[in-house]
Structures are given as C-alpha cells and as structure tokens.
Amino acid sequence: MAKVVVALGGNALGKTPEEQLELVKNTAWSLISLVSSGNQVVISHGNGPQVGAINLGMNYAAENGKAPAFPFPECGAMSQGYIGYHLQQSLQNELHRRWMNKNVVTMVTQVAVDPKDQAFENPTKPVGDFYTKEQAEAIEKEKGYTFVEDAGRGYRQVVPSPLPKRILEIDSINKLIEAGDLVIAGGGGGVPVIFTDDGLQGVPAVIDKDRTSALLADNIDADKLIILTAVDYVYVHYNQPDQKTLKKLTISEAKKYIDEKEFAAGSMLPKIEACMSFVKDHPDREAIITSLSGLKDALAGKLGTVIVDG
Ligand SMILES: Nc1ncnc2c1ncn2[C@@H]1O[C@H](COP(=O)(O)OP(=O)(O)O)[C@@H](O)[C@H]1O
Ligand SMILES: NC(=O)OP(=O)(O)O
C-alpha cells in the first residue's frame, strides 16, 4: 500500500464557490479511485485566490462599519474551513456513491514559521484575483499593498511567504491516517504561527502549500507527492513558441533549469523546489506535477512531470 499526499492548487480550484465545488467534485472521483485501489491518501490544498477574496470581503465590510476587522491569519483559517468543507462533502458523496465506508476529516492546521524569516521583509506570495497593471498601481497607491506580475496572467497582490518549519498537528494527523481516515490537512500551507511568551500567535502571511505539502509528505513518510495545478506538465520556455514538455526531471536537471530561470517565482518554482526536497536522497520516492483533471492519467503514468532523485 502506497502512502500518497495529493496537493490541490488554489488557482486550480476556480474563483467562485460554485466553480470550486464543481472542480472538487470531479477531483473527488480520482481521489477516491486512488483510495479504492489500496492507497493511503492525505489531501492538502492551496488558498491564494480564496484567502485573498475572504480578506478583501472582510476588509470591505470592516471599512464600511458592517463587521469587525478580521486579521489575515483568521482569514487563512476561514479558507481552510471553506475549501475543506467542499472537499469533505465531495469525498463523502463519492464514497457513498461507491458504497465505501470511510471517515473524512479536515484538520485545521497551524504551521510554525520563523519570526525572523527574511520573507517577512520581501512579500512574494500572490493572493486574490488578477488585476491589470493600471488597476494594480491604483490599489498600491490607495492601500499600500504590493503587486507583482504573476506568470503572464496579470497582476496580483503579494504577501510574505515564510518557510514552514513544523506542522503542529502532525501527531493527530498521523493518528487519523493510522485509523484509516481520509485526512485533509495543511490547507493553504497551514495557518502561519510563531511561538511567543504568551503562546502561539498567528502571523499575517501565506505559507506556500507545496512546501508544506512536501513537509507533510516527509513527516508521514509518504511514497508519493502529487501536486495538482492548472497545467498538465511542467515546461521549459513556458508560454513561448518553442515551449517543451518535461515528462521526467531529476534533481540535477531541475537545478539547471532553475539556474536558467525556467520556473516562475511564486508559481512553478516553489512546486519544483518542494518536489526536489521531498525526493532528495530518497530514490524510493516520486513527485508528480500535473493538472487537477489529469490525476487519473497521471496515476496511469500517461500524464504529468515526474520528479525523482538523481
Ligand atoms: N515552467 C512552467 N511550466 C508550467 N507552468 C508554469 C511554468 N512557469 C510558470 N507556470 C505557471 O505556474 C502555474 C502554477 O502555479 P500556481 O497558479 O501558483 O499554482 P496553484 O495551482 O498551486 O495555485 C501554472 O498554471 C502556470 O501558469
Ligand atoms: N497557500 C498556497 O500556496 O496557495 P496557492 O496554491 O493558491 O498558491
């Protein structure tokens, strides 16, 4: 029996609750197929668009005196609940449809970060919707937010993205896996927290969920890490006329492409680095990057970029 961590990309989950539910329903079929073929599956997910939308809505309500201000970590926790709810429901429906009996549970997950992480000085994680250059500049002026161009798709607000150091609920996650439950954990990379004299405290940032997923996969000693996003493969010369598909990638090949700046920072680069960290010195491990709709074909070895040690 293989232990598999499947990470669903925030951008690949659509923009509205309706879109998200539809996309998650389709993915539930492949995820439950993975379970029914004897694998232990743990699911994580991103939250960039969702935490941005929640934060925007909460800020708007607060600015108009309609709701109290909600800090960013609380918005992150809400995004875990919102996406976890759709995943739980879709997975439970799919299990029910197949007459399979299994508990599905979302673990609100806190992830410890270093308060001195340089990322707090240099925001890189895109959140929320995409804007034109002009719109982004106007919001930057009005609100003081930072925007960057995101992989040719438009401008997005960026927030600090510190490295995940420790998954605080890992023991409970392991117990649930051992009990045979289908666990959703590390959503949105986990709510980033620091240790203070008064105990744990949330910090305004978004941890990259691919990095947290790699840490989670390592912590539970998974055999496979599957990162599902909006593209079927990783490419070199991405979006260029001479774009080339990468079907298999060793760590040393990946390092060369990173030096050649083939993978965009804030989108594909953290996925590649997460996969590299998971397979490094583990020839028995494998990481795959493919699309949400491509999971079935990727499991059959017909789609996706496979990253291995070497
Ligand atoms: N070299 C590359 N190969 C494939 N996709 C790339 C590459 N560089 C940047 N990208 C972009 O990265 C995106 C995946 O990152 P992102 O949208 O942040 O993921 P997520 O699905 O986790 O939210 C792809 O949809 C694509 O637009
Ligand atoms: N938290 C996070 O990495 O989200 P995305 O997958 O949406 O980028």
Image (cartoon, rainbow, N blue to C red):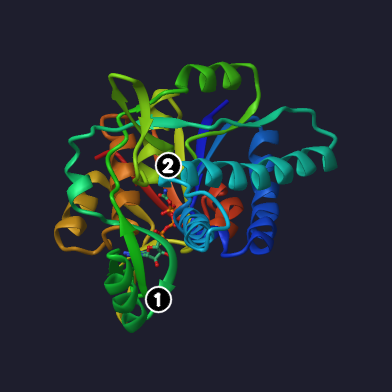
Residue most extreme to the front: 65
Q: Which kind of residue does numbered mark 2 sit on?
A: Pro
Q: Can residue 172 be seen in this view?
A: yes
Q: Is residue 210 left or right of residue 90?
A: left
Q: Mark 1 points at which residue?
A: 131
Q: Position of residue 163 (x, y in %)?
A: 28, 39
Q: Mark 2 points at which residue?
A: 73
The residue that appears at 19% across and 63% down in the rendered structure is: 261
The image quarter containing residue 93 is top right
The front one of 202 and 221 is 202
Crowd around label 2: few <14 · some 14–19 · many ≥20 (10 Å): many
Q: Is mark 2 within 8 Å of ligand 2?
A: no
The residue that appears at 47% across and 36% down in the rendered structure is: 186
The residue that appears at 52% across and 19% down in the rendered structure is: 174
- Which element carries disc 2, helix, strand or loop? helix
Quarter of the rendered structure image containing ligand 1 = bottom left
How many labels sit on residues?
A: 2
- Which element carries disc 1, helix, strand or loop? strand
Q: Can residue 237 be seen in this view?
A: no
Q: What is the C-alpha distance between the residues marked 1 and 2? A: 23 Å
Q: Position of residue 31 (x, y in %)?
A: 64, 43
N-terminal of the pair, mark 1 or mark 2, is: 2
